[in-house]
Image (spheres, rainbow, N blue to C red):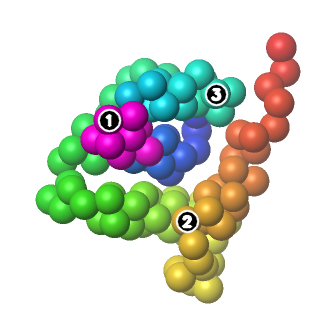
Amino acid sequence: MNRNQPFVCEMAFHIVHLHRAGETDKALNLRKQPQGMTVDDEQLHRAVAQIYGLPDQSNEAMEEWVRSQYLADGRDKGYLTDDDASAPLWLLAGKAHTHYGDLKPQAS
């Protein structure tokens, strides 16, 4: 189970976006990537359900929701500051991955 919940939300966003664009094979491929394999099915299903429950289903709104997940988690866990509020999603994600150490190779 991946402890980086904002990453799980981001992955769900990308999967929903790809499915809606008719890119189901690309969406399935995300799950086969090393990082995607750290997310269990139940985590992913919950995150996808949250996305489908958003009142605004535009890609922009869904991406902004993912940003808000990173910001809230980062402030709660102390890896982000108020100065990060306008940071791009990729930077917020990078700081979360550094905090959680979830990009490091896993010991076998």
Sequence-wise, the earlier of marks 1 and 3 is 1
The Cα–Cα distance between marks 2 and 1, rounded to whole angstroms, is: 24 Å
Residue 16 in magenta stretch: yes
Three-letter code, disc 2: Leu
- Secondary structure under tag 2 reads helix
Rendering coords of residue 76 (x, y %) = 53, 63
Task: Give whichever of 10, 42 is nearer the camera.
Answer: 10
Q: Is residue 30 visible?
A: yes
To which residue does mark 3 refer?
33
To which residue does mark 2 refer?
89
Sequence-wise, the earlier of marks 2 and 1 is 1
Sequence-wise, the earlier of marks 3 and 2 is 3
Q: Quadrant of residue 21?
A: top left
Instruction: Kindly report which numbered mark, 2 or 1, lies closer to the viewer in this rendering.
Output: 1
Instruction: Kindly report which numbered mark, 1 or 3, lies closer to the viewer in this rendering.
Output: 1
To which residue does mark 1 refer?
22
Question: Bounds of the magenta span?
Answer: 14-23
Query: In this image, 96 relative to 55: left or right?
Result: right
